[in-house]
Amino acid sequence: MKKIVIFASGNGTNAQRIIEFFQDRTDAQVVQVLSNNPRAKVLERATQLETSAISFNREALYRQEDVLNILKATGPDVIILAGFLWLFPEKIISAFPDKVLNIHPSLLPEFGGKGMYGKHVHEAVYAFAKAQHQKNPEKKVYTGITIHKVTPEYDKGGFLFQQRVEVDKDDTPKSIAEKIHLLEYEHFPKVIAKFLS
Ligand code: GAR
């Protein structure tokens, strides 16, 4: 049985879908969810699905070895960043080479980098699409999702998967976020399963 560990900072709807997807499978399971926010909804979601849920602070992640030691004890086959908003530390990436994957809610390299997460991405995509549609109402504008390997820089590692979706003229940042979440729920668990096989 392969082991999946998830890092998430907030709501954790992706984490929930991934836990559920693997719950009845015999090839892999989510064994642990880690969050930098002790009040994050993702910890509640994990606990409800009988998955170990742990929170940590900056000290434990960056200066001390606490989080690294938890991971070494668990021995994950893949580490998934599903809405994890802190920079992932180099020492963990090098302890688990090529085993850390992130999902980003745009078609990287567009709308990536520091500060580009969640609603900030959707607002930037919305503004870009609006400007494009004003210039040329016939023009199709796309956004999408990217699943990529994690390196010590934000949103820079090699891509495993991208899927696009059209931004319509009447879309809002909220409706773009909804489209993106649907794509994430559909594809992220499957991409993880394929990665592990
Ligand atoms: C997801 O849309 C994910 O792509 C994004 O945060 C959201 C988390 O939602 N990640 C980033 O923006 C990383 N730069 P969730 O907590 O409901 O799964």
Image: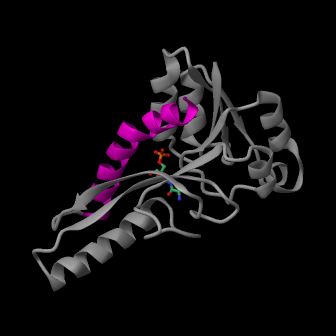
Q: Position of residue 113 (x, y in %)?
A: 55, 69
Q: Which residue is painted at 45% across and 64% down in the image?
A: 108
Question: Image check: 135 left or right of 185?
Answer: left
Is the magenta region chiefly helix, strand or loop? helix
Magenta residue check for 171: no
Is 115 rendered above or below residue 26? Answer: below
Question: Which image quadrant: the N terminus?
Answer: top right
Is 184 rendered above or below residue 131? Answer: above
Q: Position of residue 190 (x, y in %)?
A: 43, 34
Residues 52 and 146: in front is 146
Residues 25 and 44: in front is 25
Magenta residue check for 193: yes
Q: The magenta stretch spans which residues?
A: 172-197
Q: Position of residue 132 (x, y in %)?
A: 23, 79
Question: Which image quadrant: the C terminus?
Answer: top right
Name, please, the residue furthest toward the right.
64
Q: Which residue is painted at 51% across and 41% down in the image?
A: 12
Q: Which residue is painted at 57% across and 29% down in the image?
A: 46
Question: Image check: 85 left or right of 65?
Answer: left
Name, please, the residue furthest toward the left.
138
Is 191 rendered above or below residue 164? Answer: above
Residues 119 and 79: in front is 79
Is 38 rendered above or below residue 23? Answer: below
Question: Image check: 182 left or right of 90?
Answer: left
Name, please, the residue furthest toward the front.
197
